[in-house]
Amino acid sequence: MYVCFFVLFSAGPRILRYSVKVTVQSIILFYTLLKNDTPSYILLQNPPGLPSIAVTWMFCLLRRTKLIIDWHNYGYSILSLTNGPKHPVVHIARWYEHIFGRVSHYNLCVTNAMKDDLLVNWNIRATTLYDKPASTFQESPLELQHKLFMKLSTVYSHFKAPSDSASLEVEKSAFTEFNLKSGIVSYRKERPAILISSTSWTGKGPLKEYYTGLIAKMELKYIQICTPWLEAEDYPVLLGSADLGVCLHKSSSGLDLPMKVVDMFGCCLPVCAINFHCLHELVKHEENGFIFENSQELAEQLKILFSDFESNSSKLNRLRQNLRESKQIRWDESWDQTVLPLFKSCKP
């Protein structure tokens, strides 16, 4: 039986493969829900919503459970990236979301732009719940930065101090130094700036080799590019140690926001982000970062921001100070303010 499903998934017309896959997933999901105790609410994220919205709705009808959909994007818009907007699968997915997206008792969404779109084009009323950073995302103390840099230097040469700066009294990375006698950590004089761009290589890891191949051919004199794989606990520390973030995220629908920037802002890390429809709901140009339209604009912004970047009066540090003063709320606070009252108001 499993062999037959495998063959159907890997061969035959795409529409047939999708149909078989959705059918199998529907059966497994419904069976799994039936095995569990009846909940008062089910909070379902979309996408992926095919087949989970319809299956969960059927379960909620059967068990008299409240269904809340959390709209992060539209599944059909993501499918259109690989199949094209006119593909039958995309049309089916759009029809499915349009019909079954209205069966929920309550809806959450990630931007005001999506809230308006859901209401105008889908007749769905939603409450905006912006993504917020977890408490682990914050500025990293110098001591923690140094520990991370020394750890990474054992694997990546980019984090090692120049060989001519070795000292028995001072432990050095490319960016920091630790005085073994005084126990004080400080930045190295004339340290390089750290620019970070979080990426999943389009979501298909094998493409990393393609891009690292292109990087290897670049003749860069003052810039080094490192593509590390970070452990979960090290990622927020590196964000909190960087000087600038770059975001190349473009929404398939133009209605969701990049979570990577949310995490960067949690670390008070200014960003340069490529523009799209609702980005202004997160990135305020020249207030907490810069918004660019193309590579030329990004290049000019990098020149501006890295000019005398260590100075307290630099443009980069003013952006960081604005983030510090903005007093961003965290995920748990946002949940308590926005979602908890919603649950209380829709008691079964």
Image: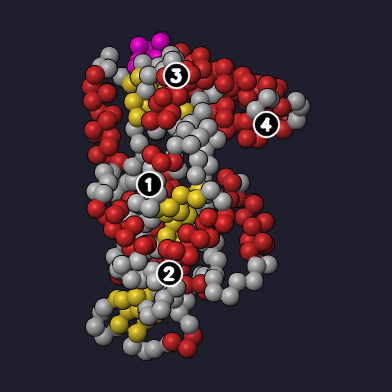
Mark 1 or mark 3: name the one nearer the start of the chain.
Answer: 3
Mark 2 or mark 3: name the one nearer the start of the chain.
Answer: 3
Q: Which residue is mark 1?
A: 284
Amino acid at pointer 2? Ser
Q: CA distance from mark 1 to mark 2?
A: 21 Å
Q: Position of residue 176 (x, y in %)?
A: 37, 75
Of helix, strand and loop, which one carries label 4?
helix
Toward the viewer: 167 or 324?
324
12 vs 44, left or right, is right
Specify the quadrant that holds the N terminus: top right
Mark 2 or mark 4: name the one nearer the start of the chain.
Answer: 4
Toward the viewer: 296 or 223?
296
Q: Count of labels shown?
A: 4
Amino acid at pointer 1? Lys
Residue 85 is at least partly visible in this image: yes
Mark 1 or mark 4: name the one nearer the start of the chain.
Answer: 4
Of helix, strand and loop, which one carries label 3?
helix
Of helix, strand and loop, which one carries label 2?
loop
Mark 1 or mark 2: name the one nearer the start of the chain.
Answer: 1
Amino acid at pointer 3? Val
Q: Which residue is mark 3?
A: 120
* Residues marked 4 and 3 touching at CB (< 8 Å): no
Q: Which residue is mark 2?
A: 307
Q: Kindly report which numbered mark, 2 or 3, lies closer to the viewer in this rendering.
A: 2
Q: Is residue 66 magenta?
A: yes
Query: What residue is at 35 percent from the left and 36 percent from the top?
Result: 130
Q: Which residues are magenta?
A: 60-68
